[in-house]
Amino acid sequence: MKYVRKVLNSAAMSMATFAAALMLVSAVASAQGKTPVQGVTDKEILIAGFGPMTGPASWAGLGNRDGFTLAIEEINKAGGINGRQIKFVFEDDASQVARAQTVIRRILTEIKPFMVFSGTNSVVFTSVADTLREAKIPVYNGFSGSVAARKKPEAPYLFHGQAVPSTAYVVDLEKLLTEIGAKRVAILHDLHEWGRSLCEPSIEMLKKKGTPAVVVQTYKFGDTDFSGQLVAIRNANPQVVINCGSYPEAAIILKQAREIGVKSLFIGDAAQANASVWARAGKGADNFIFNWFSPAFLSDETGPMVPFRAKYKARYPDAPAGRPNHGDAFAYGDAYIIAKALKDAGPDLTPDSFAAALKNIKNFQPTPITGFGNFDNPGHEGFLKSVWILVQDGKTQVIGAPQLKTIAGMVGAL
Amino acid sequence: MTIIQLLVNALTLGSIYALAAVGLVLVFKASDLINFGQGSLVMAGAYVGLVFLLSGMPLWAVLIVGPVAGGVMGYLLDLLIFRRLSKASAWVFVVASLGVGGLLHELANAIFQSNLHPFPPLLSTEPQQWLGIYFTAQNLWVPAATLGVVACLFLFFEYSKVGKAMQAVAQNRTGAQIVGINLRGILALTWAMSAGISTLAGLLVAPQVGISPEMELLGVKGFVAAALGGLNSLSGALIGGLLVAFIEGLTNTYVTTAFKDVIVFGILLAAMWIKPTGLFGSAMTKRV
């Protein structure tokens, strides 16, 4: 009996040992079957962003950082993505090419995120775009509309969000100029990549249209006096001035233009879509026109921008006048697009599954303040449509047929 | 007509450059040293004014109290930093002034971030027209204020005891001390006046450019204006400021913005070559 018990115990021990060994081997095999994905753990997805937080373009980087952060906090509070929280870090490139190279190197070699969000402006993004393409991790360009930074077909993991490409601006501009009957057009642009990417093709467009620009003037990003250029423009007596540049300069340009007696209509771009422009320019911004990429504008007094501004101010109570700016609004919407793609990619998140999910996004409005995104095109450009907005008495309205008629009348009288 | 319009426009911007230059000239006259952080005093002074404005002080009061507070800032900089370097070499002072400039810039960034803060004008910006030349009340008030400051400084240096004491210190510190002039007090007053005037420059330009850490770049133009006009000449600082603004306007209108700074610095170098002490500066002689 003792012997039988001993044999049975020994067999039981052997079986237990065998089962434990089997389980161990199975666990090792199963672990080896899953390759860890950079920037992704069971609990977290790491997204690294970059943009200018200091320097004359800091409004762009700070806007992108804060808008993106606001969205991420909402998404995390609602449970995150497939059981994971999003961690977002943002680096300062000071809008300097050399510094951006260092920042990108740090992001790729030290921070090692799952993906990169670019909240930087065109000149910097153009300089780092190829490096980001070669990095083989998802990259989402949220802010640069320069076509110099885009390729068709685009690299598999690089996507372009709400920054509508400059080529689309020129197409819309030509249509607008025809509709309002503008024949004497002046061009004023900053010498930075963004201003040039809009206005240089616009100059070509005007030549082809048979109405070459009556005068072309330029300024430097960060300039604070435009009286010289505006005097030259006044002397040329255009009906319309196309100003391509950013909103801090646009505010001064509109203000000084009125003070110097420039009577022309000013048409700007989405980088000038900021209430601080008309707040600072006062009557100089009356009849100022700019383009915009969503059905709701930043300073709307009704509609979805009202609750957006309220929660923005609650999150950032010390934000100065002019915030939220278009960087904030774009990045907020872009974060939700990214979140949708992350969710659709499923729990086994990889760069390939994310890219496939993003390309599958069709006619998707991520937030009420954002337009409709479609990434299923060779350039991976999610947003290609814009509207024109008119400023009068400090209030904005989308330009429709009645406004076009009024504007055409004003232009005709000049 | 274009040239006259450019001249009228240059009056406003040139006045700002002139005030920044005057601040630099004051320090140079008293200490024989160039404050490379002068632009940061313009920027920091503007933020001082902004804080008063946001606290509810009326604008006209900000324009008086702001420069006084800026003066206190200048006094503190002298007390805490520059006075301790009074026996150090010029090179040490240069590094210290750059350090102060950097410190003020980063402090502004840290407290206010890089956001642009609007600032209201004191007078109307409604355009007026006279014989085809456009101007605003703000365009007139800024040069008038600048002229007033420079005139007051001229009278101060010419007729007041303290002003003459400052000139004595500028000419010969040892000699000034021997005759009983309080050197520390004079240098402290110099820094206070320089920072106060720089604050006024920042507050006068703020309605046009807004307030941000980038305002310190005006200091570069102030330096060019002072060098062009003469680093030891107040009237030179005034003329230098107007000249720089006028040359910029001419370049923007008739050449291209891309060459604006090239031409300004080119003219500066040419002027230095022809007259190293600046257009209105005088050669400084020392007894050996």
Image (cartoon, rainbow, N blue to C red):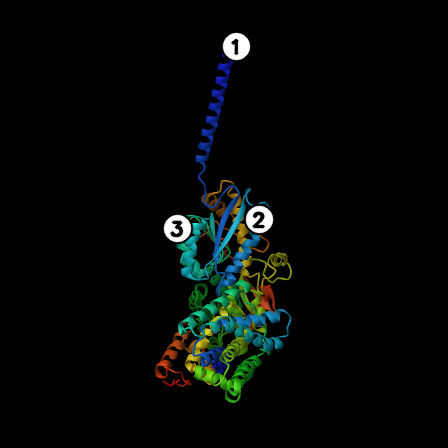
Whether A340 is drawn above or below A318: the answer is above
- Residue farthest to the top? A1
Total count of labels: 3
Q: Mark 2 lies on which chain?
A: A
Q: Which chain carries label 3?
A: A
Q: In which quarter of the image is residue A197?
A: bottom left
- Judging depth in this view, the residue of B89 and A254 nearest the camera is B89
Local crowd at mark 3 within 10 Å, few (<14), some, or many (≥20)?
few
Where does the image place residue A60, in percent across and percent down from the top left?
A: 51, 61
* Residue behind mark 1: A1
Q: Examine the rendering and report whether any part of residue A340 can be seen.
A: yes
Q: Which chain carries label 1?
A: A
Residue at x-position 37% and y-position 77%: B266
- The dot on residue A134 is 3
- The dot on residue B113 is none
Are the residues flagged by discs 1 and 2 in contact, CB closer than 8 Å? no
- The dot on residue A75 is 2
How far apart are the two marked residues, 3 and 2, measured between alpha carbons? 30 Å
